[in-house]
Image (spheres, helix red, strand yellow):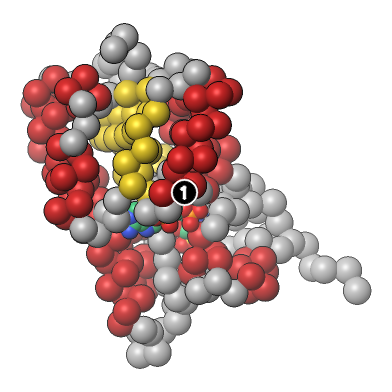
Amino acid sequence: MKKNKIIFITGATSGFGKSIAYKFAQHGFHLILNGRREDRLREIEKDLTEQFGTKVISLPFDVRDQQAAINSIDSLPHDWKKIDVLVNNAGLAAGLSTIQDGQTTDWDLMIDTNVKGLLYVSKQIMPLMIAEGSGHIINMSSIAGKEVYKNGNVYCATKYAVDAITKSMRIDLLEHGIKVTSIDPGAAETEFALVRFHGDKERAKKTYEGYSPLTPEDIADIVFFAATRPPHVVLNDIVVTCTAQANTMYFHKETPKS
Ligand code: NDP
Ligand code: 8X3
């Protein structure tokens, strides 16, 4: 296989992950795409192959399943294990309520995906990067990992954990020359709100009413910029919001005309 750069993206079936896949495909990267919905991965693989001639490996697995992560990453062909960029993007919010009213199944889902899933995937890929003496890990955290907000409790806690893990990774990997970046977006319109509100389309739509949120393409541009700095430069932490958002709590929204 020709030495095009290889990017491994978790959560590539939707939202940020999917846009990141298209952005890097347009710039000649080879892609390893993960997510649970295999039909979507196959569709994206087919489209990228047809549009850009991209080489893609679809690697459907649930990041919460450590054995699946081990088996899937082990199964990659030798040349595909030279991963240049890992984007730990798979993640979700489930629910928006006080702790006393929260669903423990939602907490387990968020903690297992956003924290443990990120660790399971990283644990398999870090040794591959260390063996190469280079690489770049980009963790999708959130503005929710910088400031908590009302009813955000456990989701925020998972993103604070991602922030701590990112900082720790940077220290662990320093001697190996591996870059570690955290990207911390504010509100962006993806399937995120639909998932958070358990499929309630009306409530999800309201999340983005009265202002222009970030788009998945905005985030893909930032990931691409971060991943293409010269070897001696690393962007450690990037907080990005839409212009109508000041922090996790303050938005400037247009009031709907009656
Ligand atoms: P989407 O819901 O559109 O995408 C989430 C992606 O994660 C999907 O591809 C989904 O794929 C994947 N995913 C979820 N659970 C798993 C799992 N267990 N195993 C493998 N893949 C999984 O949301 P976004 O694109 O918005 O979210 C991407 C990341 O960005 C998340 O970490 C989120 O917390 C973060 N974020 C989002 C913001 C927003 O406002 N949208 C702002 C800040 C951060 P599938 O269901 O096929 O498995
Ligand atoms: C997603 C952004 O503010 O909804 O991480 O938590 S927020």
* Residue appearing at x 33%, y 47% in the figure: 60
* Residue appearing at x 41%, y 49% in the figure: 38
Quadrant in which the N terminus is drawn = top left
Q: Residue furthest bottom?
A: 100
Q: How many numbered marks does the figure carry? A: 1
Q: Is residue 208 visible?
A: yes
Q: Residue furthest top?
A: 2
Query: Quick check: 188 above or below 201?
Result: above
Task: Tell me the amino acid under the disc marked 1.
Answer: Asp
Q: Is residue 131 left or right of residue 187?
A: left
Q: Residue furthest right?
A: 258
Is the distance from the Cβ of mark 1 to the nearest ligand 1 atom less than 8 Å? no
* Residue appearing at x 31%, y 69% in the figure: 109
Q: Which residue is mark 1?
A: 39
Q: Is residue 87 visible?
A: no
Residue 35 in the image, given as x and y percentages of width and height: 38, 49
Residue 184 in the image, given as x and y percentages of width and height: 42, 48
Residue 181 in the image, given as x and y percentages of width and height: 31, 36
Query: Quick check: 168 above or below 92?
Result: above
Q: Is residue 183 left or right of residue 26?
A: left
Query: Quick check: 60 above or below 50?
Result: below
Ligand 1 in which quarter? bottom left
Residue 209 in the image, given as x and y percentages of width and height: 71, 63
Quadrant in which the C terminus is drawn = bottom right
- Name the one closer to the observer, 146 or 73: 73
Q: Quadrant of residue 232?
A: top left
* Residue appearing at x 35%, y 44% in the figure: 34
SS for tag 1?
helix
Q: Quadrant of residue 223?
A: top left
